Image: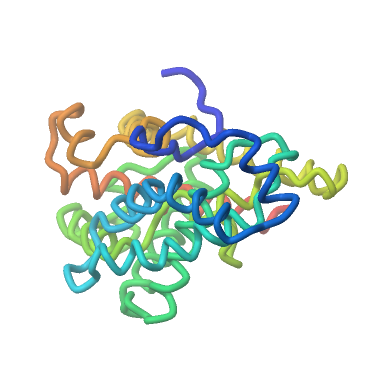
Amino acid sequence: MTELETDDIDRPPRTVGEPVPEELWRQYAKAPAQNVRDQLIVHYSPLVKYVAGRVAVGLPQSVEQSDLISYGIFGLIDAIDKFDPKRGYKFETYAIARIKGAIMDELRSIDWVPRSVRAKARAVERAYAKLEADMHRAPTDLELADELGMSEGQLQQLLSQISLVGLVALDEMLSGDGATLGDTIPDAEAGPGGTYEVEEMRQILAASINHMPEREKVVLTLYYYEGLTLAEIGQVLGVTESRVCQIHTKAVLQLRSRLAAADRTA
């Protein structure tokens, strides 16, 4: 597999139509009229359904996807209001991060993740960090289970429990303050220092992914870069959807521990 880059981690859905004419964006930038914004909202609304569908994977059944879409609409509106076409990146890339951020913020506000599950996820992250520091490589499932004082089967059950509440996602792990991949888009006014920090984070993330075991790397690539669902990835790998979910959870927790370690040594 070729080395990974970190641009455009999430691809927009193929259902979004032709690009909105630049003239429409220019009109809105010059005079943000309600009717122009409404046209932009309607055009990009498939992005909200796309993001809500991906966030909904593994969430409890009590969380309605229609609610996620409602939360995401506010993120889309915020993205439209704050988007600057002059900065040279695609609106879809920017909007996906804002939509997902709005959904996750609302989910956090209703405290839908049990504290015990959060604590278990942090324990797995700490175990990854310790083993990688000691062995200078990614630990196997058996080694991780031993470090946590459980069997390999119990580890898989734990990963399933963590994944079932949708606790981990690649774009939710860049920092402890809720920053997402969309927030790493360089700001033309950020200066050389800010640009350097963004590039450094991308390099750390890409290097971390490229040093992961092949199966974890494949799952992250197909899910975040190619936009496949967990069920479709399972068909590619010849495993169940629940197994793919476990692999995804394990991979993201491992990346979180590596980025945390990088922050501590910075």
Figure coloring: rainbow
**Residue 260 is at least partly visible in this image:** no
Q: Residue placed at 18% from the left, 59% from the top? A: 157
- On screen, 195 above or below 72? above
Q: Residue placed at 33% from the left, 75% from the top? A: 113
**How many numbered badges does the structure rendering display?**
0
- On screen, 127 above or below 119? above
Taking the view exactly as shown, the residue that stands out farthest to the top is: 2
Q: Residue 217's spot in the image, x, y percent?
A: 38, 33
Relative horizontal placement of residue 81, taking residue 50 as reference (left or right): right
Quadrant hosting residue 239: top left
Relative horizontal placement of residue 41, taking residue 57 as reference (left or right): right
**Residue 175 is at least partly visible in this image:** yes
Q: Residue 138's spot in the image, x, y percent?
A: 42, 40
Q: Toward the viewer: 213 or 15? A: 15
Q: Residue 226's spot in the image, x, y percent?
A: 37, 30
- On screen, 113 above or below 138? below
Quadrant hosting residue 263: bottom right
- On screen, 118 above or below 111? above
Q: Residue placed at 41% from the left, 18% from the top? A: 1
Q: Residue 131's spot in the image, x, y percent?
A: 45, 50
Q: Toward the viewer: 20 or 127? A: 20
Q: Residue placed at 56% from the left, 64% from the top? A: 178
Q: Toward the viewer: 219 or 261? A: 219
Q: Toward the viewer: 35 or 107? A: 35
